[in-house]
Amino acid sequence: MSSRIIWVSPLAEGWAVLCTGLEPLVFRSGARAEAYAKRLADRIAPLGRAVQVRVLDRSRNLVGTQLYPAV
């Protein structure tokens, strides 16, 4: 089974947390968006699905990836 990916992506004014099957969430701060994405991954992984959190910078370059293994 493939892992679910949660993206933290820049917007014109703010940051989005994007995950297939969930409504996008928007934050003013990239740090808050990243923290929320990690909390979400902490809740999904125990349900038996591995999760990757991928963080993009303002130029849309991948600057971080964290894996949460399925439990």
Image: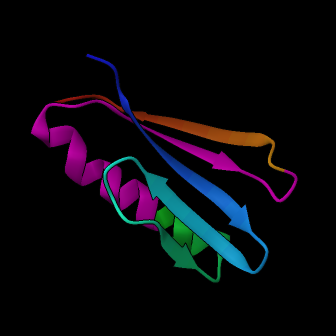
- Image quadrant occupied by the N terminus: top left
Q: Indicate left or right for 46 with 64 as reference.
A: left
Residue 63: image quadrant is top right
Q: Position of residue 53 (x, y in %)?
A: 49, 43
Instruction: Identify whether 67 is placed above or below 53.
Output: above
Q: Position of residue 57 (x, y in %)?
A: 78, 54
Q: Indicate left or right for 31 with 57 as reference.
A: left
* Magenta residues (range): 36-59
Q: Position of residue 67 (x, y in %)?
A: 43, 32
Q: Position of residue 43 (x, y in %)?
A: 21, 53
Q: Nearer the viewer, residue 59 or 31?
A: 59
Q: Residue at x 69, y 77 (%)?
A: 14
Q: Is residue 45 magenta?
A: yes
What sort of colour scheme is used for the picture? rainbow
Instruction: Identify whether 70 is placed above or below 32.
Output: above
Residue at the limit of the structure toward the right, as seen here: 59
Q: Residue at x 48, y 65 (%)?
A: 35
Q: Is residue 56 magenta?
A: yes
Asked whether the viewer can see residue 35, the reply is yes
Q: Residue at x 41, y 55 (%)?
A: 38
Q: Indicate left or right for 35 with 15 as reference.
A: left
- Image quadrant occupied by the C terminus: top left
Q: Residue at x 22, y 29 (%)?
A: 70
Asked whether the viewer can see residue 34, the reply is no
| Image mark count | 0
Q: Nearer the viewer, residue 20 or 40?
A: 20
Q: Indicate left or right for 27 with 1 as reference.
A: right
Residue 29: image quadrant is bottom right
